[in-house]
Image: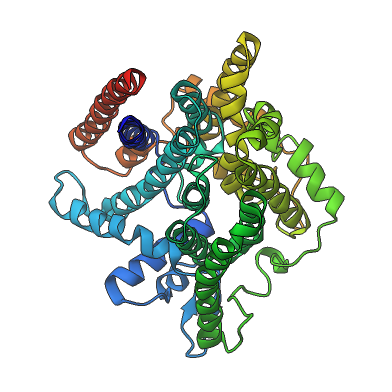
């Protein structure tokens, strides 16, 4: 009975933490859809809601198309419909909100809709941050260490920055963490049941439909099951593989139906400047140097708490070997894969975008480090957390696209410049806008939704009401979170 009460209270903490982070992220959201990857998925969701199709003729009309014509001549996105399907409710909510909300002029209708759709990233990022707590707590980490680890991930890694933009990576991070929880959010003595394995397979299959590259995680998860369960894990591993395999087979059939080949994913042969993006022409040493040491893409510069999490993976292995395999090996697989990818930098983006889905997995090592470490570990965690928070704020305060589109990011051949340093350039840009008495035009300056919508002509009263609602909800759920934590401490 006591164990059931503890689990129930942990779930309450998880729910209130998720809601607190969700509204906090909504306050800090950019509310903007601007890069090609964001625009294409936005149009996918619009097409699904309005026409029941994944084709994106709107992108062609807007001159923002990236993809390939299918066998009927319809323009298709080069991604599965996973993210578009999951954000469709936000699209419906946005369409309703712009109909009933006063103060939105005709020229701002689509911009207001995009602000709501972008809010989906806040929800997915909040879910990922809260899942770190639930996973650590339900495998036996004390609540204080689990919550601290969760907040470090939520506020001091790129999960915070990407909560404000409409990329797929926050969703992928939440899905991978949920799959890890399905398999390993249990005590060390509890075997993985077939329902849990099937749920993990469903989640990993869903990740494929968000971006097919997330197939990289599946063999690591299967290995983790076998490491944890040994011989008795064969049935669970087979269940994960079978369920995820159904999703994978369906994706290949989608390719065949649309493009006439199981292995044609719909990517165009070339993009900007005729450069082939979806190939593996980057020397491994170049990609690794970029992900580890460059000022614009270093994993450890943009996710500073990982410096403390990495040694924690060894301690995690003493508690749950399977989870340690996922935390330690999945990031390695993603780094090695994307280090060879031609567009390894992730296109126009802030920090190591493609690695975001595995950052929270590696950060699970924070749990045992914080629980078992002494005062020096906690002081280091505070320092890394504060510095990491500052890194995210720099990237969120002004537009990374404004900073990168002027030639500092790519050279004339569309090759990433290793010297690009957004922490310097965006800090200088922020100082410029803080000291300038001239309002920046729309799309420039401070990169928050309430600034953006104000420049678009939305009534100030409408913006203030929305901002106050989000702030009040964040405060309310922060108070409920504190009460739930106190109750957990008494159980």
> What's the colour scheme?
rainbow
Name the quadrant of the C terminus: top left
Q: Residue at x 66, y 28 (%)?
A: 424
The x, y position of residue 195, in whole percent, is 42, 60
Query: For the image shown, how many numbered marks are present on the structure?
Result: 0
* Residue 15 visible at all: yes
| 300 to the left or right of 75 | right
Return the residue nearer the eye: 221 or 481. 221
Q: Quadrant of residue 252?
A: bottom right
The x, y position of residue 331, in whole percent, is 68, 46
Return the residue nearer the eye: 267 or 220. 220
Q: Tell me if residue 416 comes above or below residue 28 in the rendering.
A: below
Q: Residue at x 56, y 78 (%)?
A: 68
| 458 to the left or right of 416 | left
The x, y position of residue 190, in whole percent, is 50, 45
* Residue 387 visible at all: no
The x, y position of residue 468, in whole percent, is 23, 28
Return the residue nearer the eye: 355 or 237. 237
Q: Tell me if residue 275 comes above or below residue 449 in the rendering.
A: below
Name the quadrant of the N terminus: top left
């Amino acid at each position: 009975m006591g164990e059931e009460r503890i689990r129930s209270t942990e779930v309450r903490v998880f729910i209130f933490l998720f809601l607190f982070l969700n509204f906090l992220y909504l306050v800090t959201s950019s509310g903007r859809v601007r890069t090609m990857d964001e625009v294409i998925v936005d149009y996918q969701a619009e097409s699904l809601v309005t026409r029941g199709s994944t084709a994106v003729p709107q992108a062609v009309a807007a001159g923002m198309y990236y993809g390939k014509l299918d066998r009927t001549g319809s323009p298709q996105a080069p991604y599965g419909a996973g993210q578009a399907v999951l954000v469709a409710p936000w699209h419906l909510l946005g369409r309703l909100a712009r109909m009933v909300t006063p103060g939105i002029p005709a020229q701002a209708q689509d911009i207001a809709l995009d602000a709501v759709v972008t809010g989906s990233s806040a929800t997915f990022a909040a879910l990922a941050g809260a899942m770190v707590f639930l996973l650590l707590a339900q495998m036996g980490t004390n609540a204080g260490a689990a919550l601290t680890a969760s907040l470090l991930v939520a506020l001091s890694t790129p999960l915070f920055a990407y909560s404000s933009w409409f990329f797929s990576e926050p969703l992928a991070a939440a899905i991978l963490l949920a799959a890890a929880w399905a398999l390993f959010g249990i005590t060390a003595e509890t075997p993985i049941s077939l329902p849990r394995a099937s749920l993990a397979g469903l989640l990993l299959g869903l990740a494929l439909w968000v971006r097919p590259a997330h197939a990289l995680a599946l063999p690591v998860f299967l290995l983790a099951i076998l490491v944890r369960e040994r011989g008795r894990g064969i049935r669970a591993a087979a269940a994960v593989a079978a369920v995820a395999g159904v999703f994978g087979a369906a994706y290949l059939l989608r390719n065949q139906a649309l493009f006439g080949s199981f292995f044609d994913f719909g990517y165009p042969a070339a993009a900007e400047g005729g450069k082939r993006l979806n190939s593996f022409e980057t020397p491994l040493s170049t990609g690794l140097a970029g992900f580890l040491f460059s000022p614009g893409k270093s994993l450890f510069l943009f996710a500073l708490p990982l410096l403390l999490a990495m040694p924690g993976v060894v301690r995690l292995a003493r508690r749950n070997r399977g989870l340690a395999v996922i935390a330690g090996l999945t990031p390695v697989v993603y780094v090695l894969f994307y280090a060879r990818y031609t567009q390894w930098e992730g296109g126009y983006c802030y920090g190591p975008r493609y690695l975001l889905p595995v950052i929270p997995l590696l950060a699970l090592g924070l749990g045992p480090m914080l629980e078992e470490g002494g005062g020096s570990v906690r002081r280091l965690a505070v320092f890394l957390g504060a510095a990491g928070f500052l890194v995210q704020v720099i990237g969120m305060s002004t537009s990374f696209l404004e900073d990168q589109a002027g030639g500092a990011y790519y050279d004339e051949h569309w090759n990433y410049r290793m010297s690009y340093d957004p922490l310097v350039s965006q800090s200088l840009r922020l100082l410029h806008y803080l000291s300038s008495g001239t309002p920046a035009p729309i799309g420039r300056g401070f990169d928050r939704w309430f600034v953006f919508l104000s420049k678009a002509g939305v009534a100030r009263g409408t913006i203030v009401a929305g901002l106050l609602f989000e702030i009040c909800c964040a405060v309310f759920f922060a108070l409920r979170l504190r009460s739930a934590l106190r109750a957990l401490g008494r159980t």
